[in-house]
Image (tube, grey):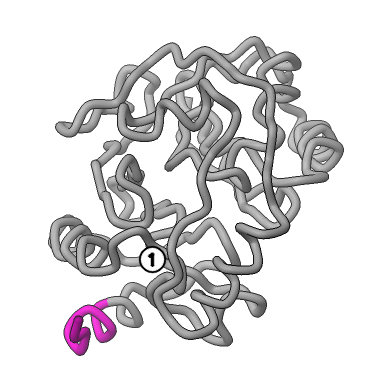
Amino acid sequence: MAFSFYRIPLGICNSFLLRGEKTILIDGGALGGFPAFQRQLQTLKVDPKEIELILLTHGHWDHITCLADIQKLTGAKIAVHGRDQFMVETGEPPFPNGVTAWGKAMAWSARGMLRPHLSPLKVDTVIPDSGMTLREFGIPGEVVYTPGHSMGHVSIILDSGDALVGDMAMNDWYLRLSPGLPVLADDIVLVVESWKKILPMGIKRIYPAHGMDFSVDVIQKEVESFTP
């Protein structure tokens, strides 16, 4: 089977459907996203049971709010890095720190108002620091450990040069007005170090979890000019 992938907006968070010899879903969607997930599968003519794995870039609430419903529909296993495993298995993920002034205000208000209590779910595959290959699914790419936004964040680097980077970058109006580094991160210096790790891997286009895709040139410039 030829490989293809699709962006599926689920609430404020993009998920991505990767179809090779097998099918996997990247991220579990934000509040209100489950009906959109069902509609998109129908549009793409994908049987939910085709999805064998739900691979989480990280465990924050907006990436796992629909996870229980999606897993129930698909029967898929769940994979997440070990450092974010507790977020899925307790159903009470923490909110990340703010980096910019706007990010700090957002984090402060979210911690006062947003206290998610999601269905605890068992993690089937714990992603190690060494990452994992997707080639056993017939998907030409690798999962790479890219901590910083959360300590268990991973990114998916495809052979095509497309990079599904979760919250390593952001491009949506309520976060930042133009694409670039995240305004929320537990350790922004570590985010930049993670970018330095993956930028040499032939990345051409960035697909963030929030907002539309953009050229890698944007991130390269931000990383080069970054000062802690």
SS at badge 1: strand
The answer to whether 118 is drawn above or below residue 62 in the figure is above
For the point 41% across and 26% down, the residue is: 85
Q: Residues within 10 Å of mark 1 (few under 14, many from 20)?
A: some
Picture coordinates of residue 225, whole percent (x, y): 20, 89
| 220 on left or right of 81 | left
Camera-side residue of 97 and 31 = 97
Which residue occupies 28% across, 83% down? Answer: 222
The magenta region covers 220-228
Percent coordinates x, y for residue 223 in the rendering? 22, 78
Instruction: Tell me the quarter of the image containing the C terminus.
Output: bottom left
- Residue 80 is one of the magenta-drawn residues: no
Vertical position of residue 22 compared to residue 36: above or below: above
Name which residue lies at 46% across and 74% down. Answer: 183
Q: Is residue 220 above or below residue 208?
A: below
Residue corresponding to mark 1: 205
- Residue placed most toward the observer, 127 or 133: 127
Residue 78 place in picture, x, y as percent: 50, 20
- The kind of residue tagged 1 is Arg
The stretch drawn in magenta includes residue 227: yes
Tell whether 10 sits left or right of 216. right
Residue 203, picture quadrant: bottom left
- Residue 41's spot in the image, x, y percent? 76, 33
Residue 153 occupies which quadrant of the picture? top left
* Camera-nearest residue between 140 and 201: 201
Residue 193 in the image: above or below residue 9: below
